[in-house]
Amino acid sequence: MDKRQVYTAAAYLCDSGARNGQDLNAAIFAYNHADWYVADVLAQAAQYESPTTLGGENDATPAALQAINYAEGQLGLPYLWGGDGPAAGEEGFDCSGLTRAAYEAAGIPIPRVAQDQYNAGPHVPEDQLQPGDLVFYGTPDNIHHVGLYIGGGQMIHAPRTGELIQIAPYRYAGDDFAGATRPSASAHVVSY
């Protein structure tokens, strides 16, 4: 790609909503109407960032980086209700299966279901999010979704049936963000 093509693509993305922190996902989707393409472009962009400063945030622990790297490797796999991924002989993950597998790859056991992951804590304020934190949706007593925060306002998650594991903003119009936790090696694991 020559410089003119780069500038043209950048201008198109800006005109499609990527200017000044607007919706980058929608802008990339306008360029190529494929969810897998959006996830692939965002994953490649994340690889250009230093692994210790994902999204400009530099407080990621080595375990959090391992969890993120694992989750990035699952981008493009299908959502599968109750799915625990290829290591379990399944073609995809559900949201909590992905986050559990990511932290398992980092040597940190966490519970299997999103509600138990939320309950396991420790909870962190939204303004103190760091790459590797888990972000939850629903209410504290009825968590229905979880994603892995990767920095820069983005998460990796397995959204729902018919969609692929992808990178997306962790906050979006109409979300029911409930809170965040920071898994650690000292976290107590509750029953699966």
Image (tube, rainbow, N blue to C red):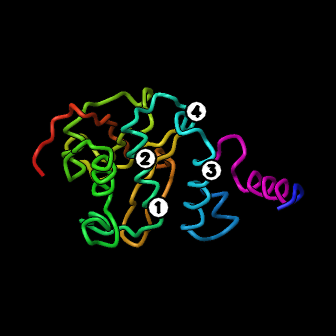
Q: Which residue is drawn at 50% across and 39% down?
A: 151
Which of disc 4 and disc 2 is earlier in sequence? 4
Q: What residue is shown with label 2? A: 68
Mark carried by residue 75: 1
In percent of the image, x 34 and y 36: which residue is there?
180
**Amino acid on which disc 2 is placed:** Ile
Q: Which residue lies furthest to the right in this view?
A: 4
| Marks 2 and 4 in Cβ contact (< 8 Å) | no
- Nearer mark to the viewer, of 2 and 4: 2
Q: How far apart are marks 3 and 1 (CA)?
A: 13 Å
Give SS at disc 4: helix
Q: Which of marks 1 and 2 is nearer the N terminus?
A: 2
Q: Residue furthest left?
A: 191
Label annotation for residue 45: 3
The kind of residue on which mark 3 rests is Ala
Question: Which secondary structure, mark 1?
Answer: loop
Labelled pair 2, 3 in contact (Cβ < 8 Å): no
Q: Residue at x 38, y 46 (%)?
A: 67
Q: Position of residue 42 (x, y in %)?
A: 59, 54
* Amino acid type at image mark 4: Gly
The CA span between labels 2 and 3 is 14 Å
Q: Distance between the residues labelled 2 and 4?
A: 15 Å
Write the start and end of the magenta stretch as one range.
5-23
Dot 1 amino acid type: Leu
| Residue 185, placed above or below residue 138 | above
In primary-sequence order, the first of circles 3 and 1 is: 3
Q: Element under label 3?
A: helix
Residue 7 on the magenta span: yes
* Residue, disc 4: 56
